[in-house]
Amino acid sequence: MEGDILRYTTRVVSKYWKLAAAALLSVSLAAPVWAGTASAEAPAQQTSTAQTSTTELQAQGAAAGPVADRGLKYLVSEYETRTPSKYTAGSWKPFAKALRSADAVADDTSATKPEVAEAKTALMNAAGDLQAADEGTFQTITNNTFWNDTSGNPIYSQGGGVFKFGDTYYWYGVHYLGAESYRANPTRKYDGEVSFRSIPVYSSKDLVNWKFENRVATRSTPIQNGATLGQAGWVGRLGISYNENTGKYVLAVQAYVGGGHGVLLLQGDSPTDTFDYGYFQTQITNSPTTGTGDQTVFTDDDGKDYLIFSNREGRSRGFVAKFRESDSLRIEPGVEIRRGDGREGNAMFKLDGKYYHAASDLHGWNTSVNYVNESTSSNVQGSYSSEYVFAGTEMDYSHVTQTGFFVTVKGTKQNTVIYAGDRWADFAWNGIGYNQWVPITKTGARPQFHSVSQWQFNVTTGEWRVGPANNYILNPDIQADRIIVSSVRGWRNLGGSVTNVNGGVNGSRFALQVSNSGGVEQRIASVPAGNYTLGLHARGSAGQVVITDANGSQRTLNIPSSSGWAKRELTGIQLPSGAATVTVRASGSGGVVVDQLSLVKTSPDTPPPPGRYEAETAPAQCRGTIDSNQAGYSGSGFCNGDNAVGAFAEFTVNSETARTATLGIRFANGATTGARPANLVVNGSTAGALSFESTGAWTTWTTKTVTVSLNAGSNTIRLDPTTATGLPNVDYLDVG
Ligand code: GCU
Ligand code: CA
């Protein structure tokens, strides 16, 4: 086999470049096939043909060789449209070889019939052996929950980083005492529980399922001057640099130990080794102070590592520093890339060729927007733009976090950066050791932060999507502001009095209070079309929550007054795709207090069965209100007619022909006064009298059938109550 390939090498080479040149000219065809073949197959050939001029290539293209076998030629042209990314590299390689070999045979006027037949068979066999590429699988990341490792034990990893060695991601961070306390009792404040336990390392192939590997350092890890890491006043903000010269993994840890602030460098022989003391560097040249304000390790595309940090006092300067090339055991002089307001949580990511330095406000471990400086050259230590607010971090202070670190994933379909946020703000009872990860993409000129509470990620393709249980409301637990404010993050004041108050539901710290007939609203930029449930907990005076969809249609959830917390829910909200606005209003001067708001998609947007006309959907008319407070209805609500004669419900239905049709009217009658009679009026004429008997409860729905004559085209079907009790609640009309 190999011999056959070599025999045709010369011809293959010219043919290959002819096609490659053609592919460059015609964007649509086959470029990936040959691009893939070149990289996987023939580096030597690439070199030898690199000298061929473009003119020469075009001349070769014009003078195509005679067709030895039309069948083989056809087969080759068919297979040339296949793209390597769709197949595994292992199965693509022999296929690409067979294809090039067959192509050469087809072009060879001296090829014998057996040679043609052999090439054809070989090509067909290789095509049959092609294996579809791994499309990966979507794994779910759920924020605002405690994460466990693959053994079911808590993941304790704070302020660290994720590093990829080979095909495996390793996650390093700090396990603090407070993270344990917070897990055990999340509704308490934990002051001063940042005492160091260990630096665990977890491994994963998909960035979602993490296997505990080891504690690379513990309280008993020996450090400088005969001390141990347990004696350090602070251990945090760490990252790994792999050193090519020593083959060692060097952990750079922000530390305060023995009265000195600095970067503690520990080293191990493997990513999961027990690490040993390397060096404690107090001063990084060019930084005005010892130690670092905050720091992370950023690994560039070329494998080079940099320490990203701010100066410790004031934190007004941002630096990018190299690790010493010989052993990574020193931090080289810092190159200042920003100066201005104090920033911390300094971290770096690269997306589509640009470097982005992101950092938080100095909110004392608390949440804030992220600020970005982007590179204006191709050098990570070069110049950067002035600072701007990271889009998507404004409404809920970066999903109620401080910048932690970033992970860049290069998928087969797209590159996605993961923002790993730290929610360890003790001051707001947001807990210690609480990881919140969200995706970052770049669609326009700037990166976009997607504040999702649940999402699904495919590490193979790099694709992500919003998770089925995602809460579309931002800052739903009123946690983003760490202090009492009169304008709550993510919620726009509409008048009256607005504030966050102490004492949220389920022992949480804060809730949102609206009083003096006031209101707040949150505009959700985009929801997918579907059926939604709006939920919240409320106490205090009466109020209401209104959801307005992209078309301006509204649904209202009335909140009765309640001394204690009560859960309120509005189900079956049919939302078109686009923006949606949630408004919370106080009914009077008293304050309505709300917490744990949620807007969650409950089902895909399933089309109604043919012939079903919902009473809440135009052109249907309801003289009364469209309600959704009696469970069991279909669609997004039902017609609650006024209790009066003349309060009708009307449907407009279409019939292709004049015919007799069976109607099904779904209703509920929970009235204690018995049946609610009504006339059935078809196209303005009374067609019969119906008795809508009691169904026993307003939530018990039943369907009454009746036969009517329909005209061809549009027909109106109206239910006209004949007594002052009005109609039952009417859900829909089925036209059989
Ligand atoms: C109750 C019930 C309504 C119903 C009304 C009525 O108020 O909640 O859904 O329409 O009675 O008697 O008509
Ligand atoms: Ca009614």
Image: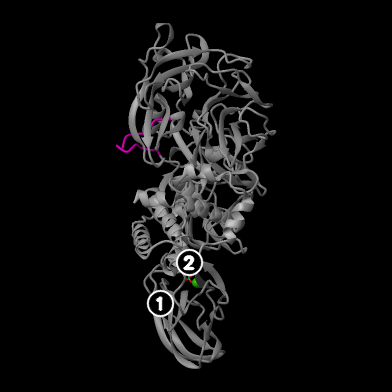
Identity of the amino acid at label 1?
Answer: Gly
Q: CA distance from mark 1 to mark 2?
A: 89 Å
- Residue most toward the left? 151
Q: Is residue 391 visible?
A: yes
Could you say which is closer to the camera, residue 429 or residue 404? Answer: 404
Question: Callout 2: few (<14), some (14-19), or many (20+) C-alpha neighbours within 10 Å?
Answer: some
| Mark 2 lies on residue | 67
Task: Establish whether ligand 1 lies closer than 8 Å to the Cβ of label 2.
Answer: no
In the image, taking residue 94 as reference, residue 572 lies left or right, namely right
Q: Secondary structure at mark 1?
A: loop
Could you say which is closer to the camera, residue 452 or residue 250? Answer: 250
Question: Callout 1: few (<14), some (14-19), or many (20+) C-alpha neighbours within 10 Å?
Answer: some
- Tell me the tag on residue 490: none
- Residue most toward the front? 110
C-beta proximity under 8 Å, tags 1 and 2: no
- Residue 124, given in percent of the width and then of the height, sits at 36, 62
Of the residues under marks 1 and 2, which one precedes in the sequence? 2
Q: Is residue 536 visible?
A: no
In the image, taking residue 157 as reference, residue 380 lies left or right, namely right
Q: Residue at position x 56%, y 81% from top?
A: 646
Q: Residue at position x 45%, y 32% from top?
A: 163
- Residue 664, given in percent of the width and then of the height, sits at 42, 81
Q: Which range is magenta?
A: 146-157
| Type of secondary structure dominating the magenta stretch | loop
Could you say which is closer to the camera, residue 550 or residue 244? Answer: 244
- Residue most toward the top? 225
* 711 in relation to 230, above or below: below
| Mark 1 lies on residue | 674
Q: Residue at position x 40%, y 42% from top?
A: 206
Q: Quadrant of residue 74?
A: bottom left
* 276 in relation to 86, above or below: above
